[in-house]
Amino acid sequence: MSKTEDKVKAPSEPLFSKKNRRLITDPLSDNNPITIQVLGICSALAITVQVEQAFWMSISVIFVMVFGNLVVSLLRNLIPSRVRIIVQLVIVASLVIIVNESLQAFVPDVSEKLSVFVGLIITNCIIMGRFEAFAMANKPWPSILDAVGNAIGYAWILVLVALVREVLGSGKIWGASIFGNNLPGEESGLYAIGYMNNNMMILPPMALIVVGIIIWVQRSMNKELVEEN
Amino acid sequence: MESTLDIFVKAIFTENMIFAYFLGMCSYLAVSKTVKTGVGLGLAVVFVLVVTVPMNYLLENYVLKEGALVWLNPEYGVSGSKTIDLGFLSFIMFIAVVASIVQLVEMLVEKFAPALYGALGIFLPLIAVNCSILGGALFMQDRQYSTILDASAFALGSGIGWFIAIVSLAAIREKIRYSKVPPALRGLGITFIVTGLMGIAFMSFMGVEYGKKKEEKTSTVSTVETSQIINEKLEQ
């Protein structure tokens, strides 16, 4: 976006103009941070064993991204470009500390399960990537929309992967059994007729394979996204 | 109590940064297109981990931990009357150490080892935002290693594990170029699946028992016991 264009459009542009809406909708599918831009995989995969963890992780990332993008966008003309990485890291780190302390205070057991991965939001490439690519060059409002779009694009993949792994791996959704009781000796529901959980799904490598399959499905539906080689 | 060697071997195989915790995945996927760049980034990660983890260890144990400031004044200790716990600052301190060390290392390498700089140069700045470096510091904090030697062994082991992972993936990707991959899976998709399969292969190291007598040390256990170990791991 060039500066002149920005100046002409800014005063009359409605808050949810077509261009602004695209900022939110694009990252949900065609420009998804995980499956297309390959950002933020690090933390995405490790915490997708249960939907609950994935949900809290998503909330944390949404919070950090929205406020981080807003702050960086407000400071964009004040940050000297030579030290911008460190400035950005400090902004993210402060926001992550807020998130971590709140998680410890309000949902202590989730915080325990997420362990170091909350801290690793700091180096989550999505956040740094959006700071660099968008917030450093755009006004606060579009930056917030961009953050919301990308964070939700990240969140839905995360929750989807967690859903697949939790349903197939432990037969539960959000900790509640859906296929009946599988305690030995008192099986009920599907387990009574011989169904078994796929323990493989709980192991870390399956997260990668599930994401691989999501990418496969997405690219089969949209041929434009197929890579050359 | 684990010995230093156990920590080292465990960090390379059982608790491999990539296959068990997915740390540093972004640069892992982006830079693993050829073996040459893979080796460059891998070496840079080993180097930076070995420098930053011990530094963060000192910071953690002499500044941040609850009662760590006891060397300033006995009253600041755990049992003192004015206990100080700066634990909440650890994220910001660790990342500041990592970012500044990376910058410093880059300048030093450029000045004193131009050949190495030629090989690592473009990768060093990338490393400040590589999750495996901050992850190394946070795991070190989480696991509370008892000496700085253990922390360094952990850092070296994780670095080597990361190196092995990126070089082997890069080698596989070089070969995959000559195979017929379904169009929609090309590039990213197949890379994910290959990494997943490599991860499953690495899971077999879970059966290795540590801390036994020398002759038993590397003997693997039967499949039944392996699955028990895996289940125990998952419950933790």
Image (spheres, coloured by chain):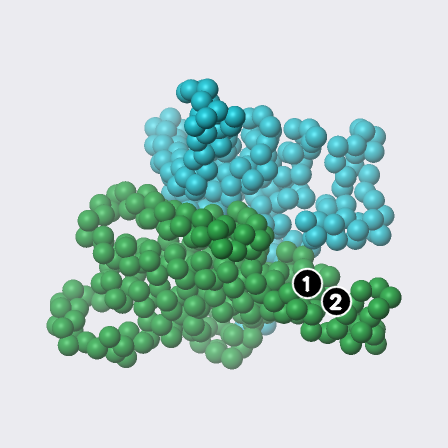
Q: Residue at x 58, y 34 (%)?
A: B144
Percent x, y for residue B133?
48, 41
Q: Colour of chain A?
A: green
Given the image, on which type of amino acid does mark 2 rest? Asn
**Numbered disc in front, either 1 or 2:** 2
- Could you tell me which secondary element the residue under label 1 belongs to? helix
Given the image, on which type of amino acid does mark 1 rest? Met
Per the image, the residue denoted by label 2 is A197
> In the rendering, which numbered label is found on residue B44?
none
Per the image, the residue denoted by label 1 is A201
- Could you tell me which secondary element the residue under label 2 belongs to? loop
Q: Which chain is cyan?
A: B
The residue closer to the viewer here, A63 or A142, is: A63
Which quadrant is the N terminus of chain A positioned in? bottom left
Percent x, y for residue A58?
47, 62
Q: Residue at x 45, y 34 (%)?
A: B85
Residue A203 occupies which quadrant of the picture?
Answer: bottom right
Q: Is residue A227 visible?
A: yes
Q: Is residue B192 visible?
A: no
Do the residues bearing badges 1 and 2 touch, measured as CB atoms within 8 Å? Answer: yes
